[in-house]
Image (spheres, grey):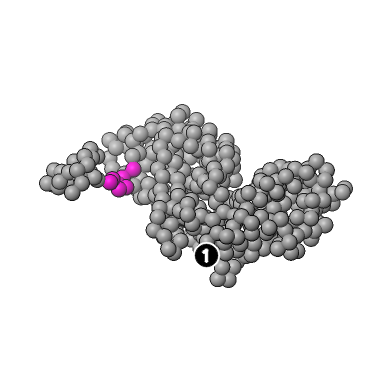
Amino acid sequence: MPNIENTTPGADFLKSLGFPTLDVHESFTHFDFTTPGRRVLVIGPMGSGKTEFAARVWRDASVARRKSEKVRAMTSTGNLDRRKIFFIRSEIDGGRFSEYPEDAMPYRSGYIRCGENIARIRDSFGFEEVLKDNPDVGTYIIDEASFFDERLAYVARNYSIEKGCMFVFPTLILNFRREFFNSTARLMLDIATDVIPLTAYCEHSDCMASAFYTYRYYQVGEDECPALYFDPLIVVGGDRVKNSNLEPNYAARCEQHHFLPGKEYTFFTLKPLGEEAGRGNSEPLRNELQALHENPEKSLLYDNLLRRYGNSPDASIYMNSMKPSHIAEKAIAYLFCEQNLLGESLLVRMVTELGLDTVYLEKVLSENRHPVSFSQTYLL
C-alpha cells in the first residue's frame, strides 16, 4: 500500500473518512473567480481538451452567478464581475466546427451556447474593441490565442493588472513541428500567471503513452502521410477526418509516433537554395521546385528522405510524406512567408513560370498573413 502524504483538501477529506494514507490526485473541481488579474494558460496538443476545460469554466460561472450579493463582492473589481464570461475566437478559424451554432463555444464532444457573449476578431485591435464594449465582463476566454498577433498578450496583461479582469487562454503553444507556435505563443508563457498543461492518449493505434505533441498528417487512400517540415504553419479547416492529399488531419502523438520528415532537407537544402535565389541566382531553386512539381522522385527532397530514412523501421511512413500534392507550392510558400528569402516579384515570376497552383497559394499565403494576388501584373 502506498505511503505518500498528500496535504491537498481532497486528501484531508479522505483521511477524515478513515482512508489510509495514499497519494491523492486532485481532479477539476471548481474555478476560482475571486482572485483578480489571473492570466490562465491552458496548453496541450490538439484533442487534449483545452476548449472543453474552458467550457467547464463557463459552466462554473453560471453556477457562481446564482449566488448572493456577498459572493458578487468577492468576484468583482469595480464594475466588472469575473463570473461574467465572454468567449472570443479568431476570424480565420471559422472553418472548424462549422456544423455548430454561430454562438457556440465548440469542442470535440459538444458545445456551450454563449448567446451574445461571443465575438470573432481578426487581431489585437479587435480584441481591444471587445474589451471596451463590455466593461462589466470580468473573464474572457480567448480560444487559440496563438493565432493572433503578439500585441494581444500585452493588451491582456495590462488590462488584467489595471482592471482586475481574468483571461483564460486555451491554446496551442507548440506547432506540428514541435516548436513554439510563433512569437505570440512565447509571449503567452511570459505573461501567464497560471499554466495548466493537458495531455491525451497517443492516437497511434498501437500506443497508450501520453501525447504532448500535435501531429499533422494527410490521409491518402489507405496511407498515413506525415506532413513535411515545411508544410504551411497555419492551415485553416474543419475538425472532421479527411481523406485528402490536400487537407491535413491532426492527432495527439507521443514522441515515438510523431513523424516529422524533411527538417534536415529544409535547413540543409531548401533554405540555402532560397538564400541563393534571393541573391540573384534563382535557377537552382527553380530546378528543385520544378522537380517537386513535375517528378518528385527526381528531387533533392526525395533523395534526402531516402538516404535518411531508407533503413528505418518506419521508412514507409516517412516516404509517404511525398504522396500529398502541392509540395512545390508548400516549399516556395515557406521560403516567402516564414524565411522572407524571396521578394514578391520573384515569387510571382517563379510560380507563373512553373505553373504552380495560384488558388492554393493565395489561400495559404493569406492564412499565414502574407497575402499575394497572382492576378496582378508585375514588371519581371
Q: In the rendering, at what x and y percent does residue 48 appear?
A: 43, 53
The residue most toward the top is 162
Residue at 31% x, 45% y is: 30
Residue at 84% x, 51% y is: 377
Residue 41 seen in this snapshot: yes
Range of the magenta residues? 25-31
The vertical placement of 82 against 143, above or below, is above
User: Which residue is denoted by mark 1 in the rendering?
Assistant: 241
> Is 257 displayed left or right of 60 in the figure?
right
The vertical placement of 331 against 41, above or below, is below
Instruction: Identify the main secondary structure in magenta.
Output: loop
> Is 38 displayed left or right of 343 in the figure?
left
Q: In the rendering, at what x and y percent does residue 269 appear?
A: 70, 49
Q: In the rendering, at what x and y percent does residue 219 appear?
A: 56, 66
> Is 366 displayed left or right of 14 in the figure?
right
- Viewer-closest of 377 and 19: 19
The residue most toward the left is 18
- Viewer-closest of 174 and 79: 174
Residue 136 seen in this snapshot: no
- Viewer-closest of 320 and 157: 320
Report how many numbered discs are placed on residues in the image: 1
Residue at 38% x, 39% y is: 82
The reply to whether the magenta stretch includes residue 273 is no
Q: Which amino acid does the dot numbered 1 rest on?
A: Val
